[in-house]
Image: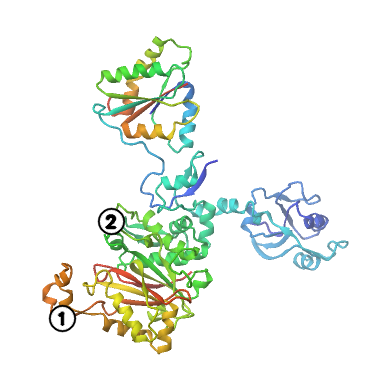
Amino acid sequence: MFVASTEFVQAAAAQAHSLGFDEIARVFVAHPIQDRTDDEMRALADAAFEEIVATISGED
Amino acid sequence: MNQVLLDPTSERTPSQRERLARPTKLDGLKVGLLDISKPRGDVFLDQLEKRLRGHNIEVLRFAKPTFTKPAPLDLRHEISTKCDLVIEALAD
Amino acid sequence: MLPDGVVVVVKRDCPTCRMIEPVLAQLDVASGLTLTVFTQDDPAFPVGVGKVVHDDDIAVSYHNQIETVPTVLQVEDGTERGRTVGWSRDQWESLTGVHGLGADLVDMRPGCGSLSVDPAIVDGLRVRFEGSKLHARRVQVAELEDEAEAMFDRGWSDGLPVVPPTEARVLRMLDGTDRAPDDIVAVVPPDLVECTVEKVAINAVLAGCKPEYLPVVLTALEAACTDTFNIHGLLATTMPVGPVMIVNGPIRHRIGMNDGVNVLGQGNRANSTIGRALQLVIRNVGGGKPGGVDRATQGNPGKVSFCFPENEERSPWEPLHVERGFAPESSAVTLFPGEGPRGIVDQLSRDPESLARSFAACLRTVQHPKLPIVFDAILVVGPEHGRVFAEGGWTKAQLRERLHELTLLDGQAIVRGADGIAEGVPDWARDSQLPKFRPDGIVIVHAGGGAGLFSTIIGGWANGETGSQPITKEIAS
């Protein structure tokens, strides 16, 4: 699976489709990324963690 | 423009590439974290690693040489042989 | 449906059409005549005519088989009663009933190609107008996928590259048969799938066939899927066998098969792709693949493709299909459950008896020298060997009879343990003589190049009820 910022929603769908893999698993995190502090990055990771785990496994 | 081909098979299986079946539990599995090497992504992945290790999941770290090109063949092969699951991040 | 009256199909990009533009205006005002002009390219052409229809998708031209512009049609009750192509004053006046047309023009001038037959667009037109008769699932190759890799990835290949089965290619392949695309050809094992003419055509495109090869492939598939031939068993066995196709009759040369030098080898498109198409149908439609239902321990290269024509013209004997009851002027395909070919060298026998003995010595070892009855074989007699029998005056029947006599096996030599070899027949056969081959077990054909004192044996799989038996079918179009 991949993690991308919300800016990538359309592009990811298009890329997946053109590679014949519409189903590829993905999780989106809030944009922007580049100007965030380390603490903000960690918070993003924490916020996305449950969804990431659910996406790669059958676990909830 | 996508090329259209006629399916030569009996059509009893789907034609699109499918995801592999997801495991029911993560423990005992090796999760690879692939850094696409855009700035700040490493901090994100460090935190994911910390959280995954907290769940008793083995984590392996990898990084692409550059985010501007697809991952090199050797790296892809290494990941596919060493890991059960892969999380690739962080595209922005 | 065409409108009644006089219909003319034109395109501006045609000097003849431009030349007769005034004639169209003449027809338009002629009393008692209803004129409709279909223009293929420019809706503003021609001027001076009341009813001009722009055939912008070329549908009208396509469906009315317009090959030339201008074409003049006379239509009554929606049906075409007559047509003329190009400009000819006599023809136009006769068809329309109007006289004095184009008085200042030359008497005749040929037209130009209609857009509906333009090579640059005709494939697209076919797909648009005939594509609906294709029912197979459409598979989109993603933009960033390499189409050759995409087909390997989807498992459609036998290990060698395949030709992308586009709608245009499959429509062209279907021109090779009169059968409807949705006709069921056979129920194909192992998945027992009803296989249509269309599915065979798709696999024939994959294989690299030309449309004229399709009837051979269709007939071979019908033959393969019979109880007699038992393609399912042949596929599932651990023995190294697959379907071997022998083609007879006029179709061989009509479609360019090679029955001479290197007849069993590479290099001829028809030989190679026809055999391949049959195997691709079994793989892709039937679902029979190595590692799956196909459990061959070692297999043989002939399982990619094994199809060859008999060399009838130089043969001293009647062709195989005639021997099996078909008319000489008919074309037929015989299927045999066979392994890879094995050579026979005999460069010294000048009389038929000696050569027959050579053949027999080699035939005795088919699958194993100590195993009788259960395996058939094809004997492919090369032309130089054929000449020995011709000069000695031996018919095919005589050769066959002598081979059966010479391949009678002595029980003592073939029982288990004899010669220190555990394999063999049970001890109760010790005092018998057992035939190596059952009465119809040696199939004799003639093929190959004119130089070389060599022949070939193609050993068979298990014959009889549980195995497979050779079958011959006539090839219809």
The subunit carrying tag 2 is: C
Residue at 42% in and 52% down: C157
**Residue C251: horizontal and vertical position, in percent?**
49, 72
Looking at this view, is B91 or C353 the one in front? C353
Q: What residue type is labelled 2?
A: Arg
Question: In percent of the image, x 73 and y 58: which residue is there?
Answer: C112
Where is residue C315 shown, x and y percent of the image? 45, 81
Judge whether C135 appears above or below C367 on screen. Answer: above
Q: Mark 2 points at which residue?
A: C295
Q: In which quarter of the image is the N terminus of chain C?
A: bottom right
Q: In this view, does B1 lie to the left or right of A36?
A: right
Mark 1 or 2, nearer chain start:
2
| Left or right of C419 on screen, residue C41 | right
Q: What element carries label 2?
A: loop
Towards the viewer: C43 or A40:
A40
Chain that bears disc 1: C
Q: Most extreme residue toward the left, as rendered?
A: C428
Picture quadrant where residue B75 is located: top left
Query: Is A44 placed left or right of C40 in the picture?
Result: left
Question: Which residue is pictured at 49% across the width and 60% down the height?
Answer: C209
Q: Residue at x 48, y 15 (%)?
A: A34
